[in-house]
Structure formats: C-alpha cells, structure tokens
Image (cartoon, rainbow, N blue to C red):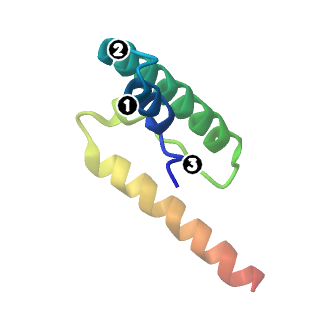
Amino acid sequence: AFQGLGYLQLGGYLRGDYDLAEVINLIKKETRHFAKRQLTWFKRDTRITWYEVDKFVNNYEKLLTEILSNIGRTISINVEVE
C-alpha cells in the first residue's frame, strides 16, 4: 500500500519535511522518471509495434489499415504456432 507515485513525497509534506511547492516539483520529477523507465521497458519488448502517428496526420485510414494488418499477422502467427 502507498507505493504509487507521489505517496512518499506527500508523506514528507505531511511530516513537514517539504513545503507544497517542493512536493509538487518532486512528484513531477518522479513521474517523469517513472514514465522514462516505462518507455524504455516497452521499447525493449519486440512484440510491440510502434507507429509514428505524425506520419498519418492527413490519412488516418492508412494508419488503421496498417494497424489491422499487423494485428492480422500477429493472430495468424499465433494460430499457426498453437
């Protein structure tokens, strides 16, 4: 319990270790670090396909087609393996 982002820093605020502005900055910093670790973890997972959405700004149908195509390949691969 109380292992989520910000709990440790909020506890420091309640104990008087930090003022509110410091706690807010600490929580923002820890959130950025957490997000960076998460992104690094996801980028290492070869099962994940990343899409550069900016390339499809004027053509979302093409993006959807590409996503559905990748899903179809993944499903057919999984079916054949089983």
Q: For mark 2, give the secondary structure.
A: loop
Residue drawn at x 58%, y 74% as measured from the top left: 75
Q: Depth check: 36 or 24 in front? A: 24
Asked if marks 3 and 2 touch (Cβ < 8 Å), the reply is no
Check disc 3 and report the residue beneath it. Answer: 49
- On residue 64, the disc is none
Residue drawn at x 62%, y 43% as measured from the top left: 42
Mark 1 vs 2, N-terminal side: 2
Instruction: Identify which amino acid the numbered label 1 is placed on.
Output: Lys
Residue drawn at x 62%, y 33% as measured from the top left: 37
Asked if marks 1 and 3 touch (Cβ < 8 Å), the reply is no
Q: Quadrant of residue 7?
A: top left
Instruction: Identify which amino acid the numbered label 3 is placed on.
Output: Thr
The furthest residue to the left: 58
Check disc 2 and report the residue beneath it. Answer: 19
Check disc 1 and report the residue beneath it. Answer: 55
Mark 1–mark 3 Cα distance, whole angstroms, equals: 15 Å
Mark 3–mark 2 Cα distance, whole angstroms, equals: 43 Å
Q: For mark 3, give the secondary structure.
A: loop
From the viewer's perspective, is the residue at label 1 or at label 3 nearer?
3
The C terminus, quarter of image: bottom right
Asked if marks 1 and 2 touch (Cβ < 8 Å), the reply is no
